[in-house]
Image (cartoon, grey):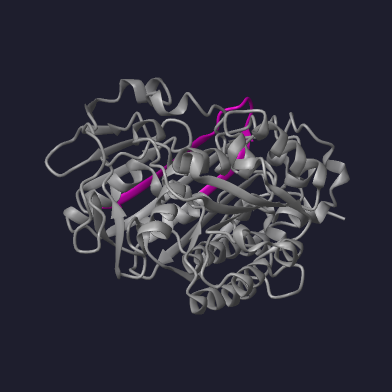
Amino acid sequence: MMRASLPLRHLASVSGRQALPRSAAAAARAVRPVAAQPVLGRASPFRSGIAAGARGLATTDGSQSVDFDPNAATSMDKMEPPAPGADFNVVIVGAGNINFGSDEGPWNHSFRLEHKLGPRLKVVALIDPSAQRAEAALNVKRNSFVLSAYKDTVVYPTFADYVANMKPHQKPHAIWVGSPPQYRGREQPGMDLEKKLIEAFPDVAIFIEKPVSTGPVADAQKVADVLEKSGNLISVGYMLRYLKVVQKMKQILEENNLKVMATNARYIMAYEHTAKLDWWDKSQTCGPIVEQATHFCDLSRYFGGEVDLSTVAAHSLEYFEPAGHLSKIPVDESKVKPENRIPRITCATWKYESGAVGSLTHAVSLQGFNYSTEIDVLADGYSLRLVDPYNAPALYFRRPGDDHEEVVRYQNDDPFFSEVSNLIDCIEKGPGASPILSSYDDAVKTYALTWAIREASEKSAKKPAK
């Protein structure tokens, strides 16, 4: 399984932590905290086809989209227990970390499905070419209180095997795709999972992890076109869109009728414990911009709108340059071909179609465990700064007439649960019951931006002396 991109390391503790100042300078900065409004119970009934607590917000193409109120209950421990009802069948594709969790971070889709659906959840099939890996994941589940969801799960090496052997009562209500992206997002046999899914189940909702592919952008766009015509409900796992602080930023922009002037994203990773050789090999994981910075490219688009890809410019610091030496790489990088070694720093700029300016800095430079991540959004009179979205999300913002920064934090938030919960709601209550914040077509546009940055940086990069 491709290395997940999140730096989070603790699942249970995240929701209750406060964001801390990043430095002594940050601690000295004059800020005025703004308490998040308390949420009492569930949101009220739906009205006019829009979920209570939802907001109509402009999408990247200027159309109306339904996003939710940052004060609405999204944390699992704030939701009412799942109501009893008929079984809800799920097929899980991929037995790796993104679907079943790891010590590296909080990703674990099965965990969220269990909490959303309770005893109704029935995982009818787990599809993974490694039967050993799949059975290991199932054994953990079967030795826990969620046994009923997995006791009859059948392991299949391929999706075709599942379809060929499926009994009528095993038809899925949803399919959760967490397999490596090199096996999907294309039209070629063996890489065309999405096509096979919708052909077998033209009326079943599908969740697909990011990035959507590792192949050519044009191929991914063809898949997006096919999925659009199919009518299947599709959600892609850009979970940072579901953060309450992100929705608060969208709310501020909308309610004040603001036009974004610039976005500035920074993703500084801690590399010392990244011990998978594939991650250091661009031929395997497409490099840190496509695989890791994709979430921040997506947030940049979410706030700034569509990017004029012809304006993307980028520079990189390469491994062979004097400033590119890293002292604590935990793998033997000499095993990676020189042309496939990842850049240490990538800096990119671009223009949005609105005329606004965007920028991104990705760095492989920190040691230890904690990453440093933030994004600025600038508009006339306003500065919005999202800090540490993976661990302890906080929004620092200034408004006209006030030189001080206000701070917004939400103690109980789980964007992974929100993206799972919203898709289930749409399946059971109908499209629009809860907002799906990342469609496949939109995710392909983020994928295109990441590739444009990588290609621009490689074009401008120095070449090693022969």
Taking 178 as reference, is 439 left or right? left
Taking 380 as reference, is 209 left or right? right
Magenta-colored stretch includes residue 448: no
The secondary structure that most of the magenta stretch takes on is: strand
Give the vertical position of 234 relative to 410 (above or below).
below
Give the vertical position of 135 relative to 432 (above or below).
above
Residue drawn at (75%, 35%), measured in percent from left and top? 275
> Farthest residue toward the left?
401
User: Which sits in the foreground, 217 or 436?
Assistant: 436
Task: Indicate the position of residue 317 as horizontal and vertical percent values.
Answer: 66, 48
- Which quadrant of the structure image shows residue 96? top right
Task: Indicate the position of residue 310 as horizontal and vertical percent values.
Answer: 51, 73
Task: Indicate the position of residue 186 as horizontal and vertical percent values.
Answer: 67, 71
**How many numbered discs?**
0
Task: Indicate the position of residue 137 as horizontal and vertical percent values.
Answer: 71, 38
Does residue 125 appear in the picture of this structure?
Answer: yes
User: Which sits in the foreground, 62 or 76?
Assistant: 76
Magenta-colored stretch includes residue 375: yes
The quarter in which the C terminus is drawn is: bottom right
Magenta segment range?
Answer: 361-379
Residue drawn at (30%, 44%), measured in percent from left and top? 384
Residue drawn at (50%, 39%), measured in percent from left and top? 119
Residue drawn at (83%, 52%), measured in percent from left and top? 338
Does residue 112 appear in the picture of this structure?
Answer: no
